[in-house]
Image: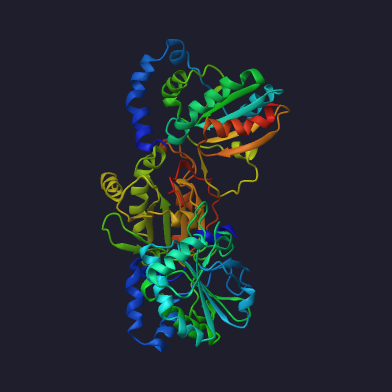
């Protein structure tokens, strides 16, 4: 399951992606509406990640020491709901709020036949300190080495801190829901309302009204899940769904300001985007290079007449989802949002030597409502400089 | 790691000067010879009995330029044990001077080639060296291929490596 660690964009809809960016703003607003509404809103917003591969599967077993060095096993919780909340580190501000929230609402969980465990990768000594300092009385588990975090897919590759994801395990031991967007201050209240929703028989997947494509890796011929990234020219967020709305085709092309190969395509991209805009094709540039900052990208686009939006994928999460490796590398979505093209723009970096224009062939077919039949060559260029994951 | 900008600056601006400053024999005789996938296959076959390290690089590729000195050291350290380095530059023919200057600076005198299709990748290379790579998968430089003494491809390495990583990769085959 190596791919689940990459799903930092868990919920599919544009709304959910916006909620992710808006962060803490969304959840307190929900709380003001009372528990019943909250449950409904949570279901509608697909706050739960239906695409997590563990949903519906037996939860990975664990036996971990609590803050008093007493072992706690999942097996012993059978017949109860288990809220398993992973958090990055003891004694840090967000984690403190989250843990305080669970201690404050401890009794409310008992009333719902549920038990809460918060888990991080620090040792029991650290837990003991954390508890006495913050007056925490719920159960904190210590997953030293991150073996359990890994089993739940919350430990980033080569990382030592768990992601802040919360798993809801049903009384039968199966994972009923996974929440990847936690508001630390109201974590317990959210958990309680999610438990209400889930115990009524709705799982994360079934609760979503019209399941949008899951935000996993893109696949040829399949719908591409929406994403939202900041536009380097305006600073505003832009989403794939909005940009591609009512378009016959959408080109998503990875570009760079510094890669000489990508730069040799500036002129071609400027021309193509302009020519095809009139025929209902949207071009979107994505810059995932960790060493290329927004002002540099915006200036580069102005200098090279790249008039289409160039979005900044700062943590290369979108490059990971597309498995984009180089610049330039092109992807094309048809009018329905299905991925129909992945490869090189054409067959030569030197514009005067081009024999086959792969991207043009694909776009010509799509604007005429025909299927894409061209077999593009593989993209060849500069490696996308990804961020180091910790 | 060198950034693209830095490596571009290192290569682009001083390149003209380096070309002039490089030893005449290297820069003017044109150390690199053109090659394609079939030619590379022949070069590897001709080195049977040796451990052959084939490196794909380009002057425009920052990580390639960064790791190149490690490859040179690898070659120097292991030549007596039967290691042979073959480099293929994916630069345009018009950048041949830049390529030769870079090779001269790194004291590479043999086994250096220039891809016939310049900085375009002829898929025949991938069919030969990485037949299992999906048709749509993008290819980035650097790439290093290790052949054992019987001429069998035993390792494909993508991305920039350190000397220690290269040494560890060839060690089992040099015994």
Residue drawn at the location 44% of the way across and 84% of the way down: A39
On screen, residue B141 versus residue A133, left or right, reads right
In this picture, is B2 found above or below B135? above
On screen, residue A64 versus residue A366, left or right, reads right
Q: Position of residue B68 (x, y in %)?
A: 49, 28
* Quadrant in which residue A203 is drawn: bottom right
Count of numbered circles on the image: 0
Q: Residue furthest right?
A: B150
On screen, residue B145 versus residue B20, left or right, reads right
* Quadrant in which residue B170 is drawn: top right
Residue drawn at the location 37% of the way across and 70% of the way down: A97
Compare residues B106 and B80 and report the one nearer the observer. Answer: B80
Compare residues A219 and A270 and report the one nearer the observer. Answer: A219
Compare residues B168 and A309 and report the one nearer the observer. Answer: B168
Assign the N terminus of chain A to one quadrant of the image. Answer: bottom right
Q: Position of residue A313 (x, y in %)?
A: 39, 55
On screen, residue A111 versus residue A280, left or right, reads right
* Quadrant in which residue B50 is drawn: top right
Compare residues A295 and A308 and report the one nearer the observer. Answer: A295
In this picture, is A30 found above or below A380? below
Residue drawn at the location 40% of the way across and 87% of the way down: A35
Q: Position of residue A108 (x, y in %)?
A: 46, 85
Residue drawn at the location 43% of the way across and 77% of the way down: A103
Q: Position of residue B156 (x, y in %)?
A: 61, 38
In this picture, is A46 found above or below B44? below
In this picture, is A100 found above or below A160? below
Does residue A364 appear in the picture of this structure?
Answer: no
Which color scheme did the rendering employ for the protein?
rainbow
Does residue A106 appear in the picture of this structure?
Answer: yes
């Amino acid at each position: 399951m190596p791919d689940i660690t990459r799903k930092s964009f868990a919920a599919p809809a544009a709304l959910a992606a916006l909620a992710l960016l808006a962060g803490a703003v969304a959840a307190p607003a929900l709380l003001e509406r009372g528990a019943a509404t909250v449950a409904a809103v949570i279901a509608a917003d697909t706050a739960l990640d239906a695409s997590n591969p563990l949903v519906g599967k037996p939860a990975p077993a664990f036996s971990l020491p609590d803050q008093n060095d007493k072992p706690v096993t999942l097996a012993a919780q059978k017949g109860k709901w288990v809220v398993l909340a992973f958090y990055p580190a003891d004694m840090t501000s967000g984690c403190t709020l989250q843990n305080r929230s669970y201690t404050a609402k401890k009794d409310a969980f008992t009333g719902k036949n549920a038990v809460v465990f918060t888990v991080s990768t620090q040792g029991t000594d650290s837990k003991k300190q954390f508890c006495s300092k913050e007056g925490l009385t719920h159960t904190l588990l210590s997953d030293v080495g991150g073996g359990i975090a890994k089993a739940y897919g919350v430990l980033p590759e080569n990382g030592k801190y768990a992601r802040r994801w919360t798993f809801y395990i049903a009384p039968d031991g199966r994972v009923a829901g996974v929440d990847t967007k936690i508001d630390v201050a109201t974590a317990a209240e959210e958990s309680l309302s999610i438990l209400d929703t889930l115990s009524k028989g709705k799982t994360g997947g079934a609760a979503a009204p019209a399941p949008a494509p899951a935000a996993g890796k893109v696949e040829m011929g399949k719908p591409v899940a929406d994403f939202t990234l900041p536009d380097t020219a305006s600073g505003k967020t832009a989403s794939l769904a909005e940009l591609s709305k009512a378009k016959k085709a959408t080109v998503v092309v990875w570009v760079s300001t510094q890669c000489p190969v990508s730069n040799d395509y500036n002129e071609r991209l400027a021309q193509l985007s302009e020519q095809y805009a009139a025929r209902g094709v949207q071009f979107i540039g994505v810059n995932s290079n960790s060493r290329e900052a927004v002002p540099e990208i915006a200036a580069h686009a102005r200098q090279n007449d790249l008039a289409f939006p160039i979005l900044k994928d700062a943590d290369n999460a979108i490059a990971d989802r597309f498995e984009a490796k180089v610049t330039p590398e092109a992807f094309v979505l048809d009018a329905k949002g299905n991925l129909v093209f992945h490869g090189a723009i054409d067959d030569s970096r030197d514009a005067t030597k081009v024999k086959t224009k792969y991207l043009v062939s694909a776009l010509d077919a799509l604007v005429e409502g025909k299927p894409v039949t061209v077999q593009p060559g593989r993209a060849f260029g500069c490696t996308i400089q990804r961020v180091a994951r910790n | 790691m060198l950034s693209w900008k830095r490596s571009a600056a290192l290569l682009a601006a001083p390149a003209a000067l380096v070309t002039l400053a490089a030893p005449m024999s290297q820069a003017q005789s044109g150390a690199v010879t053109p090659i394609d996938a079939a030619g590379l296959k022949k070069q590897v076959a001709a080195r049977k009995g040796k451990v052959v390290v084939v490196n794909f690089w380009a002057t425009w590729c920052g990580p390639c330029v960064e790791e190149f000195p490690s490859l040179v050291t690898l070659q120097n350290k292991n030549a007596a044990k039967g290691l042979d380095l073959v480099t293929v530059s994916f630069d345009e023919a018009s950048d041949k001077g830049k390529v030769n200057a870079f090779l001269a600076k790194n004291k590479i005198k043999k086994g250096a080639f220039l891809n016939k299709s310049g900085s375009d990748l002829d898929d025949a290379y991938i069919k030969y060296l990485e037949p299992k790579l999906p048709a749509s998968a993008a290819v980035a430089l650097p790439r290093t291929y290790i052949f054992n003494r019987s001429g069998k491809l035993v390792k494909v390495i993508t991305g920039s490596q350190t000397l220690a990583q290269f040494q560890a990769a060839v060690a089992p085959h040099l015994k």
